[in-house]
Image (cartoon, helix red, strand yellow):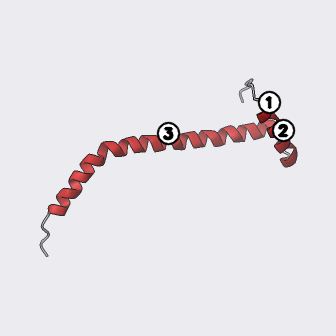
């Protein structure tokens, strides 16, 4: 484990302390879980952004291929 020092806004700290007293969870565990959750959220947002960019890149080619398939005269 790594030790870090951080500054937390007074309002966030107070709210966190109130929650911790109700859920009976150590502050360190709570902060670790919060950071892990936020990391998962950020990874998901980064993936979404990358997929949106890649989708835009291939959109033109996909539409071209779709039009070509629509023009194919299928024989039964």
Residue closer to the observer: 62 or 4: 62
Residue closer to the observer: 15 or 54: 15
The spot of residue 67 in percent (x, y) is 20, 57
The spot of residue 43 in percent (x, y) is 54, 40
Q: Nearer the viewer, mark 1 or mark 2?
A: 1
- At horizontal 58% and vertical 43% (from top left) the residue drawn is 41
| Within-10-Å neighbours for mark 1: few <14, some 14–19, many 20+ | few
Answer with mark 1 or mark 2, whichever residue precedes in sequence.
1
- At horizontal 70% and vertical 40% (from top left) the residue drawn is 34
Q: What residue does disc 1 label? A: 10
The spot of residue 12 in percent (x, y) is 77, 35
Q: Which mark is residue 76?
A: none
Q: Nearer the viewer, mark 1 or mark 3?
A: 1
- At horizontal 41% and vertical 44% (from top left) the residue drawn is 52
CB within 8 Å, label 2 to label 3: no
Q: Residue 75's image quarter?
A: bottom left
The quarter of the rendered structure image containing the N terminus is top right
- At horizontal 30% and vertical 45% (from top left) the residue drawn is 58
Q: What residue does disc 3 label? A: 46
As measured in the structure, the alpha-carbon distance from the residue carrying label 2 to the one carrying label 3 is: 31 Å
The spot of residue 17 in percent (x, y) is 84, 38
Q: Residue furthest bottom?
A: 76
Q: Residue furthest front?
A: 11
Answer with mark 2 or mark 3, whichever residue precedes in sequence.
2
Answer with mark 1 or mark 3, whichever residue precedes in sequence.
1
In the figure, 73 relative to 5: above or below? below
The quarter of the rendered structure image containing the C terminus is bottom left
Question: Disc count in the image?
Answer: 3
Q: Residue 4's image quarter?
A: top right
As measured in the structure, the alpha-carbon distance from the residue carrying label 1 to the one carrying label 2 is: 10 Å
Q: Which mark is residue 17?
A: 2
């Amino acid at each position: 484990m790594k030790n870090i020092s951080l500054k937390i806004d007074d309002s966030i700290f107070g709210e966190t302390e109130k929650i911790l007293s109700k859920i009976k969870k150590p502050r360190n565990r709570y902060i670790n879980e919060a950071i892990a959750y936020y990391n998962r959220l950020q990874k998901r947002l980064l993936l979404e952004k990358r997929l949106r960019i890649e989708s835009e890149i291939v959109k033109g080619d996909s539409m071209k291929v779709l039009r070509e398939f629509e023009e194919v005269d299928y024989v039964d």
